[in-house]
Image (cartoon, rainbow, N blue to C red):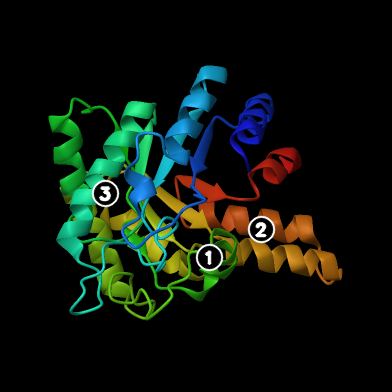
Amino acid sequence: MSIDEIVKECDLLSKLGINAIMLFALPSYKDDVGSEACSENSIISRCIKAIKSSNKDIYIITDLCFCEYTSHGHCGIIDDKTQQVDNNKTLDILNAQALIHAKAGANMIAPSGMMDNIIISLRNFLDKNDFQDLAIMSYSTKFASAYYGPFRDIADSAPSFGDRKTYQMDFRNKQEAIEESKEDEKQGADILMVKPALAYLDIVNEIKKQTHIPLAVYNVSGEYAMLKYAQKAGIVDYEAILMENMFSFKRAEADMIITYHAKEVLELL
């Protein structure tokens, strides 16, 4: 959506009773270091300011990552020798990107790149720059999943080489997935997250039992698209399955749900 259309959408959401959105940027220019992400006049910065000038009640959560901004589609700076993401160099640029979001008026930062120590790095950097009250929602347990396909297509953010398995979670490894969320809680995250949602409700429930802060689930693009295509094919009771999915997230004890179905769910409720 263009910025003017997002402003209109936020007004509609407010009328429906939805008071929070999550923004992902689709820049027109991409390079190997994601330079657009660190511009004071970036698409995300301009969008935040436009929304806030029109609707101060909308709570804006911003995605903090590089995959949408880089020509190679990876979530950070690539080391020339190893052709792997350089974790520490990426942390520095994520800090700079977060500060731009904060200055523009974001209410919460959501780092999605799965870099080691991103939460403590962000928390310290934001605190030093007088944004002690800016909340952080951690993508604390984000799996290397095939469910992200439709988003990567629309954002043109699929890796041009290799994959993201070196920094995203192995979907077969339950214990490490739980430990990742526990570690981000220790580092100062305000909200934890499991992504994707539907195939990982056992992880959601176990993390909820072992942590003490709010837990979100991200009902991702592949999950959304499958249900939409089933609806178009006329092979399922779409509304019934949609609500069954939503209540399964709550039954697993998720405190909040990030979903493309949000407007439809409100209408059904």
Of the numbered discs in the image, which one, if any, rests on residue 244?
A: 2
- Lower position in the chain sequence, tag 3 or tag 1: 3
Q: What residue is drawn where x is 65% and y is 50%?
A: 261
**Residue 195 vs residue 260: left or right?**
left
Q: Residue furthest right?
A: 234
Q: Position of residue 35 (x, y in %)?
A: 34, 50
Relative to 7, residue 249 above or below: below
144 or 153, which lies in front?
153
Q: Position of residue 28 (x, y in %)?
A: 52, 51
Q: Indicate the quadrant containing the N terminus: top left, top right, bottom left or bottom right.
A: top right
**Residue 105 vs residue 98: left or right?**
right
Q: Secondary structure at mark 2?
A: helix
Q: Position of residue 130 (x, y in %)?
A: 18, 25
Q: Which residue is mark 3?
A: 94
What type is the residue that disc 3 sits on? Answer: Leu
18 or 118, which lies in front?
118
Q: Position of residue 75 (x, y in %)?
A: 34, 62
Real-space CA distance between mark 3 and mark 2, rounded to the nearest whole angstrom: 37 Å
**Residue 25 vs residue 171: left or right?**
right
1 or 176, which lies in front?
1
Real-space CA distance between mark 2 and mark 1, rounded to the nearest whole angstrom: 26 Å
Q: Which residue is mark 1?
A: 152
Q: What residue is drawn where x is 19% and y is 40%?
A: 123
